[in-house]
Amino acid sequence: MANETSFQKGLNSFMERKGLSNRRLGELIGVSHMSISFWRNGTHEPKMRDVDALARAGMSIVELFGEDTASKLMTNGI
């Protein structure tokens, strides 16, 4: 996908690693499968509560924010 964001790459990687469909991930974190689809194709971005739910589901800080941002967050103790 052209111009794919760090979040999109991370979400796709996470879902592939866990073997999750849009529907199954949506069920796990309490959003519709369409929301997952929108996030994956860059139409919409998740709300903070959804980012929190993704982290609780096992998505890493690198997958959520990309390597550069994650490194800065960890360096600053966030």
Image: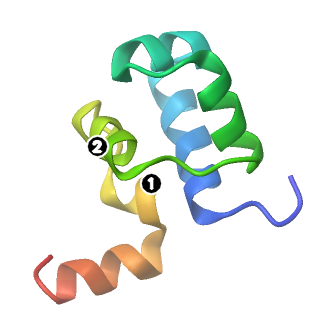
Q: Position of residue 40 (x, y in %)?
A: 68, 40
Q: Position of residue 29 (x, y in %)?
A: 36, 23
The quarter holding residue 71 reads bottom left
Mark 1: give few (<14), some (14-19) or many (20+) Cα within 10 Å: many
Q: Is residue 77 left or right of residue 7?
A: left
User: Which residue is found at the position 28% from the left and 45% from the top?
Assistant: 52
Say what secondary structure mark 2 lies in: helix
The quarter holding residue 69 reads bottom left
Please give the residue where the numbered disc 1 appears in the rendered image: 63
Please give the residue where the numbered disc 2 appears in the rendered image: 55
Q: How is the image coloured?
A: rainbow
Q: Residue furthest right?
A: 2
Q: Position of residue 39 (x, y in %)?
A: 64, 42
Q: Is residue 77 left or right of residue 71?
A: left
Q: Is residue 42 left or right of residue 55?
A: right
Please tell me whether residue 13 is drawn above or below residue 45 in the rendered image: above
Question: Which marked residue is nearer to the observer: mark 1 or mark 2?
Answer: 2
Please tell me whether residue 32 is drawn above or below residue 63 in the rendered image: above
Task: Name the image quarter holding the C terminus.
Answer: bottom left
User: Which residue is found at the position 89% from the left and 61% from the top?
Assistant: 2
The quarter holding residue 32 reads top right
The three-letter code of the residue at mark 2 reads: Ala
Q: Nearer the viewer, residue 37 or 11?
A: 37
